[in-house]
């Protein structure tokens, strides 16, 4: 049985192998840039670039036979966006060590503040949550990776070995997403404990006790901790904004490409009486659709639930203020108004808010994109049919003309003789 600390060490070195942690911990347990880790991550960037070039030049040859032009274009865009996502994650890991240190220090500061308020916020629980999510996500990824490559190789699609190595690098994106989602869930847990603390303050649950106890000092401290958590949430969002934008773009393109190819295969199966290879291919493509949807859903769900819990603090404080008479009512009003008028939100560079309305717009755009691709395919098919018809008509008229010439030549020759 592996202990918790040993498992955390294994996870730490696993992420170092993936190039996500190009730094090391010093004796004070603070981050320090690692020269070896930085060089290693740069080498990973170069190797993956060579893998991308190899896949684009050689890997698509085995797919061209089975796919339409639109599916090739969308799949190539998805491959490029996947590479860009991984490359940016590695670049951020190399260049943003100072910001990562500031985020960790802010985490520790809010942890101390919560402990001063009487909230027991153990670091071990956050690490345990991170490990659980990391294990689940990586197990799902590798099982899907193995089964998908077996199916595609068996059906004759991914016969080029370069695809195996390129697809293996796709594990970087989900692991970076694990770190971001876990950070949001930890902050959500802290906001929830703050809300519970406001309700459980002496003098809040009892109107009798409120005459003898004034919780304004605690409310000020809670407001400060809330501001620190909000600032921490903003720091984390800014750090992950660029890779998340490209990751969402990748999910959009891959979702549309796989859904489009699965629909075409489904139509082929109806004409070919449901051949086994086509059925398995449709299931493999739909598994990618499900995975990309799950990435978008859990990302937006964690962001939305964290924002909801953080903004609930202002509502709870406002309700408490209406139900109880405080000595310093003005100060309580200022804290409540600040929380209500400046709500917490998770946004990417300030123009993309991660909420369910955004997910709805993504699904709507994907549906429109697939419909457009199908319409373009239909137009291309009709154009090919017209060209084939004109070509056959031209061939028939040419043959008739040659036959007429031959007959006339034979008749004239007979008359002369």
Image (spheres, rainbow, N blue to C red):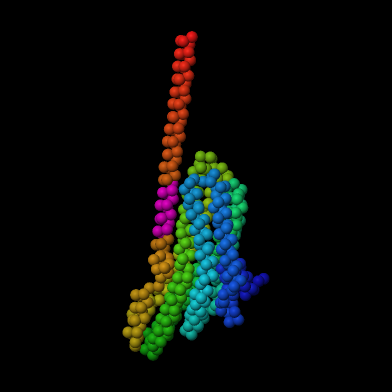
- Find the residue positioned furthest to the left: 330
- Find the residue positioned furthest to the bottom: 212
The answer to whether residue 368 is magenta is yes
Q: Position of residue 209 (x, y in %)?
A: 39, 87
In this view, 72 is above or below 234: above
Q: Which quadrant holds the N terminus? A: bottom right
How many numbered markers are drawn? Answer: 0
Q: Position of residue 144 (x, y in %)?
A: 58, 57
Q: Residue at x 34, y 88 (%)?
A: 327
Where are the magenta residues, as a range?
A: 360-374
98 and 189: which is toward the camera: 98
77 and 51: which is toward the camera: 51
In this view, 41 is above or below 212: above
402 and 298: which is toward the camera: 402
Secondary structure mostly seen in the magenta stretch: helix
- Find the residue positioned furthest to the right: 1
Q: Is residue 124 visible?
A: no
The answer to whether residue 268 is magenta is no
Q: Residue at x 45, y 67 (%)?
A: 241
In this view, 95 is above or below 260: below
Q: Is residue 381 visible?
A: yes
Q: Position of residue 76 (x, y in %)?
A: 50, 53
Q: Residue at x 42, y 82 (%)?
A: 224
Give the image quarter of residue 359. bottom left
Q: Position of residue 329 (x, y in %)?
A: 33, 85
Q: Residue at x 46, y 10 (%)?
A: 416
């Amino acid at each position: 049985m592996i202990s918790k600390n040993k498992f955390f060490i294994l996870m730490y070195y696993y992420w170092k192998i993936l190039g996500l942690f190009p730094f090391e911990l010093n004796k004070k347990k603070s981050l320090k840039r690692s020269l070896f880790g930085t060089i290693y991550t740069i080498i990973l960037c170069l190797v993956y670039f060579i893998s991308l070039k190899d896949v684009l030049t050689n890997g698509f040859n085995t797919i061209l036979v089975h796919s339409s032009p639109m599916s090739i274009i969308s799949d190539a865009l998805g491959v490029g966006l996947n590479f860009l996502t991984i490359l940016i994650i590695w670049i951020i890991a190399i260049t943003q060590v100072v910001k990562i240190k500031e985020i960790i220090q802010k985490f520790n500061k809010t942890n101390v503040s919560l402990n001063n308020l009487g909230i027991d916020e153990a670091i071990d629980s956050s690490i345990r949550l991170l490990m659980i999510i990391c294990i689940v996500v990586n197990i799902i990824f590798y099982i899907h990776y193995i089964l998908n490559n077996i199916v595609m190789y068996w059906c004759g699609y991914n016969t080029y070995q370069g695809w195996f190595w390129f697809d293996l690098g796709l594990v970087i994106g989900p692991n970076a997403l694990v770190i971001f989602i876990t950070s949001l869930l930890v902050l959500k847990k802290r906001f929830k404990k703050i809300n519970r603390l406001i309700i459980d303050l002496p003098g809040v649950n009892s109107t009798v006790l409120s005459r003898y106890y004034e919780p304004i000092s605690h409310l000020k401290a809670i407001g400060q901790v809330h501001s620190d958590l909000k600032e921490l949430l903003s720091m984390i969002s800014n750090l992950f904004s660029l890779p998340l934008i490209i990751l969402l773009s990748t999910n959009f393109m891959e979702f549309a490409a796989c859904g489009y190819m699965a629909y075409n295969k489904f139509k082929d199966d109806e004409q070919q009486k449901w051949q086994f290879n086509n059925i398995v291919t449709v299931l493999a493509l739909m598994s990618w659709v499900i995975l990309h949807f799950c990435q978008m859903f859990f990302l937006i769900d964690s962001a939305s639930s964290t924002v909801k819990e953080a903004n609930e603090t202002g509502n709870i404080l406002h309700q408490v203020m209406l139900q109880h008479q405080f000595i310093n009512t003005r100060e309580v009003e200022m804290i409540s108004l600040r929380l209500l008028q400046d709500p917490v939100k998770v946004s990417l560079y300030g123009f993309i808010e991660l909420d369910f309305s955004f997910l709805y717009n993504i699904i709507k755009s994907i549906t429109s994109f697939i419909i457009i691709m199908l319409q373009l395919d239909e137009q291309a098919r009709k154009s090919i049919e017209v060209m084939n018809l004109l070509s056959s008509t031209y061939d028939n008229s040419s043959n008739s003309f040659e036959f007429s010439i031959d007959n006339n030549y034979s008749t004239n020759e007979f008359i002369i003789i």
